[in-house]
Image (cartoon, rainbow, N blue to C red):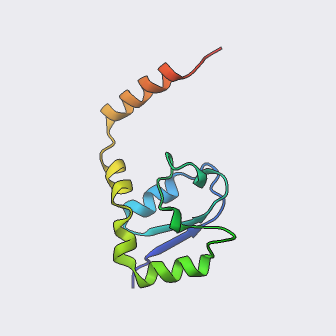
Amino acid sequence: SRSKVIIATCLRGSERMPIEATLAGLIFITNDCDNSKDVRDFPLPREHIFNERNKLVDIVQNVLDNFEEEQAKLDNFRSMYKNFGHLTMIEDTKQFYKAAVFA
């Protein structure tokens, strides 16, 4: 059998885990601690993030019961990373330097 879900908590600089899991076809579930709050870096569906209101067991059950629908919610996430390349990294770097203030 093949895994469908990865669960991790309190992402601290662990951005590779949700990216690699999603690109591999898994659904990444985490809590709302640290990095997972930033939807720009972690464009995960909010319903895949557990907290006091959204219980982990309920999220996992929903994901397993509705795997294809939940998987489709990650299409934009996968597309974003599949389209990255050296030209997009150059452009991102230019934008960073324009926006950054260096002392």
Position of 96 with respect to 103 (left or right) is left
Find residue 31 and report its horizontal and vertical position in percent.
63, 64
* Quarter assignment of residue 29: bottom right
Q: Is residue 34 above or below residue 57?
A: above
Residue at 66% over, 68% down = 51
Q: Quadrant of the N terminus?
A: bottom left
Residue in the foreground of this view, choosing between 92 and 70? 70
Residue at 50% over, 47% down = 41
Q: Quadrant of the C terminus?
A: top right
Position of 86 with respect to 29 (left or right) is left
The residue most toward the right is: 52
* Quarter assignment of residue 68: bottom left
The residue most toward the top is: 103
Q: Is residue 88 above or below residue 77?
A: above
Find residue 19 and report its horizontal and vertical position in percent.
45, 56
Find residue 30 and report its horizontal and vertical position in percent.
58, 65
